[in-house]
Amino acid sequence: MVKCNMSLVVIPFLLHILWFLMFPHTIQSQGNAFSRQPTSQFIFTPHSLSDSDPEQVHISLVGKDHMRVSWITEEKDTESIVEYGTKEGEYSKKSIGDHTSYNYFLYKSGKIHHVVIGPLNPNTTYFYRCGGSGPEFSLKTPPSKLPIDFVVVGDLGQTEWTKSTLKHIDSKDYDVFLLPGDLSYADSHQPFWDSYGRLVEPYASRRPWMVTEGNHEIETIPIIQPHAFKSYNARWIMPYNESGSTSNLYYSFEVASSHIIMLGSYTDFDAQSKQYKWLQYDLLNIDRNITPWVIVLLHAPWYNTNEAHQGEGESMRQAMEELLYEARVDMVFAGHVHAYERFTQIYDNKHDSCGPLYITIGDGGNREGLALKFKQPQSPLSMYRESSFGHGRLRIVNETHAHWSWHRNNDADAFVADNVWMNSLSNSKECWETLKQQVSHGEL
C-alpha cells in the first residue's frame, strides 16, 4: 500500500478535481455543516500483479448453498472460470460465469468477472482459483444452523482508520460481513474503486460481503454521466434476482435462521414504487418458524440524534416504517452518520417493545472524519451514542436470543464500548396478539 499522491493517479485525480469545479453539486453532499474529527490519511492501493492475475476478489452469498466469486483482470482474454475444492491445490469442481466492463468518462474498467459456485456444504472451508491461474484463495461458508456471527460496519472508505477497523474485525472470526452503504468513497474517481477492491480483498475473498448502496455510490455527473450506480452495479452484484427484486439496489437473503433485507435509500421507496411493493411481498413471505430473526439494513438512518444528516431518512421512514413494524422486524442497521448510536425499540418516534431496535453504525473509516455533535439533551430513545471509529458484531445465539456489541477502534485493541442482549420478536406472543388487535381496530 502507498499513499495516494503517486504519479500514477495524478492525471485522473486532476480530472476528478476539474469535474468537481465544473459540477460541485454532483459529488454527493454530506448534509449540513457540522464538526468532524480530522480524518486519517487516505490510502491508495496500487495494482501489483500481472494483467492476467485476478485482483479485487470478493465473494457474496447466492441462495441457500451457492456463492458468487467476483474479480477483475486487466487482461481481456482471461476466462470467467472458478476452480474449487476442499483441499489446498486440488480443484475437483469448476464453474463458468460471465463478465462485464464499463466506461466512465475517460475511464475504462478492467474485465469484471462474476462466477457462481456451488452447491457448497455449510461451515466448510473451500480453496479456489480464479481465471485458471494466479494465487489460491480460501473461503469459509456460513453455518446452516445457529449460532451465526455477523460483522456490521458502514461507511468504510479507504483510510488509515479503515485499515484499523479491518484489522480489528479480522482479529476474531465471523461468518458474514454486512455493509449498509458507502463502500469506496470513489465519488466518480474510478481508480479509487480499484484501490478499494485491492484494499478489502484479503477480507472480502475469505468471507461473504453483503452490501447495499449509499450516497457515495450514486456517482452522477450531468450530461457526462447521468446514470447512477454504474460502478457499484458492475462491481458489486448482489443476489437480487434470487429474492424477486428487479434491482441490485435492494434485495434479501437467508442464512442460518436469519432473513436479511437490504434496502435502497437512494432509489424510489414510496407506496407506488417497485421497491415498496417488493418489500411488501418479501415480508409477507417470511416464515418465522424457519427464520425467526429478521434484520434490515439501509444507508440513511430513520432515527438519528446527531446533528449530521438530520431528517435525511425521514421520508423513507414515513413510507416504509409501518411495513417493518407489522412484520415484527427485529433490528434495523443504518450508516451515513459518521458515528455510533444505539436506540431502544421504536415505532413512530416512540418506544415500542414490538418495534425494531435501531442502530447507526456509519463509523467504519471514511475519509471525511467523524460527526462529533449530538443534539442535547439526549433523547430518551437513544441508549448509547459516541463519535468514534469502530465496528459491530451481531451473534445470533439461538432462535430467541442474540447479542450485539460495538467495538471502538482504541489504538492497538478493539474496545467493547457498548453491548446488549436482544429477544427475537418472532417469539413474542404479546406482540403478535397486539398486532391482531391493532389491525382489527384499524390502527394499522
Image (cartoon, rainbow, N blue to C red):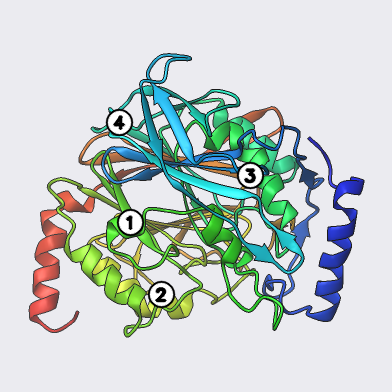
Front label number (4 vs 1): 4
> Could you say where residue 317 lies in the image, as x and y percent from the top left?
40, 75
- Amino acid bearing label 1: Ser
Give the Cα separation between the discs numbered 4 and 2: 38 Å
Q: Which residue in the protein does label 4 denote?
A: 120
- Earlier sequence position, callout 4 versus callout 2: 4
> Could you say where residue 220 lies in the image, as x and y percent from the top left?
65, 74
Estimate how packed mark 1 is, as few (under 14), some (14 to 19) or many (20 or more) residues with alpha carbons within 10 Å.
many
Front label number (3 vs 2): 3
Give the Cα separation between the discs numbered 3 and 1: 23 Å
Residue 60 lies left or right of residue 63; in this view the side is: right
Q: Which residue in the protein does label 3 denote?
A: 197
- Amino acid bearing label 4: Leu
- Earlier sequence position, callout 3 versus callout 2: 3
Of the numbered discs in the image, which one, if any, rests on residue 178?
Answer: none
Q: In which quarter of the image is residue 274?
A: bottom left
- Earlier sequence position, callout 4 versus callout 1: 4
User: Could you tell me which quadrant the C terminus lies in?
Assistant: bottom left
Front label number (4 vs 2): 4
Give the Cα separation between the discs numbered 1 and 2: 19 Å
Q: Which residue in the protein does label 1 denote?
A: 252
- Amino acid bearing label 3: Gly
Q: Are marks 3 and 1 in contact (CB under 8 Å)?
A: no
Q: Which residue in the protein does label 2 denote?
A: 317
> Could you say where residue 65 lies in the image, as x and y percent from the top left?
28, 37
Q: Is residue 245 visible?
A: yes
Q: Which of 53 and 337 is in front in this view?
A: 53
Give the Cα separation between the discs numbered 4 and 1: 20 Å
Residue 3 lies left or right of residue 381; in this view the side is: right
Q: In which quarter of the image is residue 401?
A: top left
- Earlier sequence position, callout 4 versus callout 3: 4
Mark 1 element type:
strand
